[in-house]
Image (cartoon, helix red, strand yellow):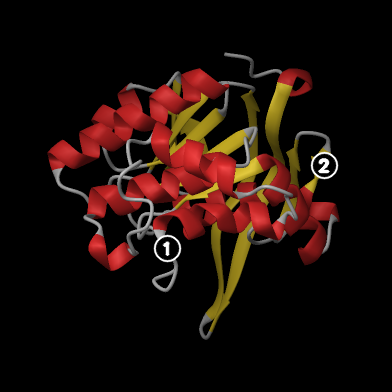
Amino acid sequence: MGDAASGSVLRAEGLGMVFRGPDGDIRLFQDIDLAIAQGETLAILGASGSGKSTLLGLLAGLDVPTEGRVHVGGSELTALDEDQRARVRGEQVGFVFQAFHLLGGLTALENVMMPLELADRKDPVTPARQALEQVGLAERMDHYPNQLSGGEQQRVAIARAFVGAPRVLLADEPTGNLDQATGARIQDLLFELNRAHGTTLVVVTHDPQLAARCHRTLHLDRGQLVAA
C-alpha cells in the first residue's frame, strides 16, 4: 500500500539516533526513510536491542531523533517543542504499550477518559464508555487495573488509544505480556478497530504471526530498515 510520500499519513526522512554512552557514541540507526499510508497496517520486526521501540517512540513524537524529520499528517513533529508535539499526539496519534501503562488509582473508565480530558473535550464520558463497550468491557468500566486480568488491562489501553479517533495507532509489543490465547484476542481486536476506523496501525513485535497479518513487514537490522 501507498509508499508514496505524498499519500502518507506518517513519514520519516533520514531518521537517525545516537546515544551518548560512557565509552563513546552508540548509533542505533541511521538514514531511515519510511512512508505509511492512511489505513495501512505495518509490522516492524528486529532483534532485542535493535532499536524498534526507540523508532516507534520517535514516530510518535515521544522523543526527538538525533537527525532527520518525522511528519504526522500535516505536522512536522521534529520542528515542534515538547508541548506542541504533545498536542499533535493528542489529536492524531494513539499509543499502546507492552506494559499497559494504566494509572492504578483510576478506574478503567477514568483511564480511557484521561486523553479526552487532557484535550479539554466537553463530554469525555460518552466516548470513553463507547470505546470500552467496543473492546468488550462494558461490565468492567468501574474496575481498577489491579482488578483486571492482563488481557483486560490491554483492552483498556487499546480503548484509551482509540478513544480520540487517532489517524495513527502505534503499538509496542502489544501482546508481549500476554498468554497465547489472550494475545490472539488482542490481535483480533487491533485489526477489527483498524478496519472499523480506517486507522493506520504500526506494530513493533517479535511475533511472526502478528506480523503476517499486516499489509507490510519491515525488519530493523544493523541500523537499517529493510523489507522482511
| Mark 2 element type | strand
182 relative position to 105: left or right: left
Residue 13 in percent (x, y) is at: 73, 39
User: Residue at the spot x=39%, y=49% of the render?
Assistant: 156
- Judging depth in this view, the residue of 153 and 206 nearest the camera is 153
167 versus 124 height, above or below? above
N-terminal of the two: label 2 or label 1?
2
Quadrant of the rendered image containing residue 11 = top right
70 versus 148 height, above or below? above
Label 1 near label 2: C-beta < 8 Å?
A: no
The amino acid type, in three-letter code, at marker 2 is Ser
| Mark 1 element type | loop
The amino acid type, in three-letter code, at marker 1 is Leu
Q: Which residue is mark 2?
A: 75
Distance CA(mark 2)–CA(mark 1)? 28 Å
Q: Which residue is mark 1?
A: 102
User: Residue at the spot x=39%, y=71% of the render?
Assistant: 104
